[in-house]
Image (cartoon, grey):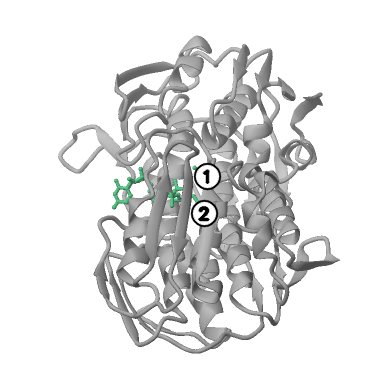
Amino acid sequence: MASFRVKGGNRLKGEIIPQGAKNEALQILCAVLLTPEEVTIHKIPNIRDVNKLIELLSDMGVKVTKLGPESYSFKADEVNLDYLEKEDFLKKASSLRGSVMILGPLLARFGTGKLSKPGGDKIGRRRMDTHFFGFQKLGAKFHYDSKNEIFHIDGKDLKGCYMLLDEASVTGTANIVMAAVMAEGKTTLYNAACEPYLQQLCDMLNRMGAKITGVGSNLLHIEGVDKLGGTEHKMLPDMIEIGSFIGLAAMTQSEITIKDAQVDRLGIIPDTFRRMGIKLEIKGDDIHIPAQKHYEIETFIDGSILTVADAIWPGFTPDLLSIVLVTATQAKGTVLVHQKMFESRLFFVDKLIDMGAQIILCDPHRATVIGLDRKYPLKGIRMTSPDIRAGVSLLIAALSATGTSVIDNIEQIDRGYQNIDERLNALGAEIERLP
Ligand SMILES: CC(=O)N[C@H]1[C@@H](OP(=O)(O)OP(=O)(O)OC[C@H]2O[C@@H](n3ccc(=O)[nH]c3=O)[C@H](O)[C@@H]2O)O[C@H](CO)[C@@H](O)[C@@H]1O
Ligand SMILES: C=C(OP(=O)(O)O)C(=O)O
């Protein structure tokens, strides 16, 4: 278990380029299984989860060629389905959440798929019913071996149909879309998730020959085609990393410019941070955050306490609520952070409370943060990172604190943030990686 030793109190200054989006990369990489032709992908982030998925694809027989630091080509012309029976496959697949999205492509192209319970953050129940109900509606048979926690899915002749998803699951929608693109006839998917990452996936599938309309809405129409071909694709910048940098700049009174942020794809994220009192200047496609000694959380128009809650896209992503929460600790004012989707994602506030933050954990889903307006800085402590976004929030807290902090279990952070220590040190942070 590696750790970060963080000296707090430095102000950072400079430009930072966001990495390619983790959660887009996981969808896009799985889609290479849909065609025997070559797919070239750019701006692939060099992070643990993505590297694990690339390794898994390679173990399945996909030919992987590294073309540059962030570019790879993939050719799935000889997929080894026998590998799915191996213990090694099940172990590797279960080490990350994104692996679940190999099922849709495997089903579409080979009529069969198998997977052990996928990993990812332990942030509450993470059911996958939506994925399997969707596959079943297309005509596949589903079997769950509860003793070994293995999902089997089989169905050679998928048929398009109408389906209303029981929830707008992100990975569920990606999986069902990828299963349906080569099903016979028309599929209509209502209550589909519609994040920019899903839009990117659908656009890529259309370039490969799929016929998907309604992209960007929660009503997708898919006309099945016989086969898909190769294409080239570039990932969006990671919006969760962008939001993390905004929070980091505010907390540490730093002046940071986030380059090439594709601001038009960030939805409600910039405005949500503005409501926290943080100044953001959009310059072309860059976001400039000036150094701010004070930032004041808005109230609602009637004067009542602001609530920041997650919601399915185009609502505010749950993955940035931990960042909003930590950012509020040094703001002026009060905010209620309401994490509706996940039930164990706010427990990390006990570490912030140990550092001196004023937070009331109302219940597993809601925390009230009373901003200290920098009257009392947080103080450095030793803590453990419970999940990826809490981990980065603790890193932000440690960078703003007086004294030195140690954050253990930084593998969680490495799952989704590329060389975060080196990139922030280049801006003036002092983060040391301890083995
Ligand atoms: C690899 C990947 O892409 N992971 C992301 C993906 O996970 P993932 O696709 O696993 O998350 P889902 O969209 O399936 O659902 C997230 C949680 O929200 C609940 N839910 C979902 C939809 C809904 O309408 N109502 C509802 O309550 C689900 O029951 C679940 O507990 O999307 C999540 C929600 O943006 C993000 O936090 C994850 O970072
Ligand atoms: C929850 C997240 O990731 P995963 O779904 O991979 O656990 C996240 O990216 O914030």
Question: Dot 2: few (<14), some (14–19), or many (≥20) neighbours within 10 Å?
Answer: many
Element type at mark 2: helix
Q: Which mark is residue 21?
A: none
Q: How far apart are marks 2 and 1 (CA)?
A: 6 Å
Question: Dot 1: few (<14), some (14–19), or many (≥20) neighbours within 10 Å?
Answer: many
Residue 77 visible? The answer is yes
The one of 10 and 175 positioned closer to us in this rendering: 175
Judged left or right of residue 254, residue 435 is right
Q: Mark 2 points at which residue?
A: 100
Q: Mark 1 points at which residue?
A: 118
Q: Does the residue labelled 1 lie within 8 Å of ligand 1?
A: no
Mark 2 or 1, nearer chain start: 2
Q: Residue at x 51, y 37 (%)?
A: 121
Q: Position of residue 227 (x, y in %)?
A: 55, 87
The one of 322 and 15 positioned closer to us in this rendering: 322
Judged left or right of residue 244, residue 87 is right
Q: Does the residue labelled 2 lie within 8 Å of ligand 1?
A: yes
* Residue 340 location, quadrant: top left
Residue 200 visible? The answer is no
As drawn, which residue projects farthest toward the left? 302
- Amino acid on which disc 1 is placed: Pro
Q: Position of residue 27 (x, y in %)?
A: 55, 62
Q: Which residue is drawn at 53% across and 69% down?
A: 105
- Amino acid on which disc 2 is placed: Val
Q: In which quarter of the image is the C terminus?
A: top right
Above or below for 38 versus 378 = below
Q: Do labels 2 and 1 touch, CB within 8 Å?
A: yes
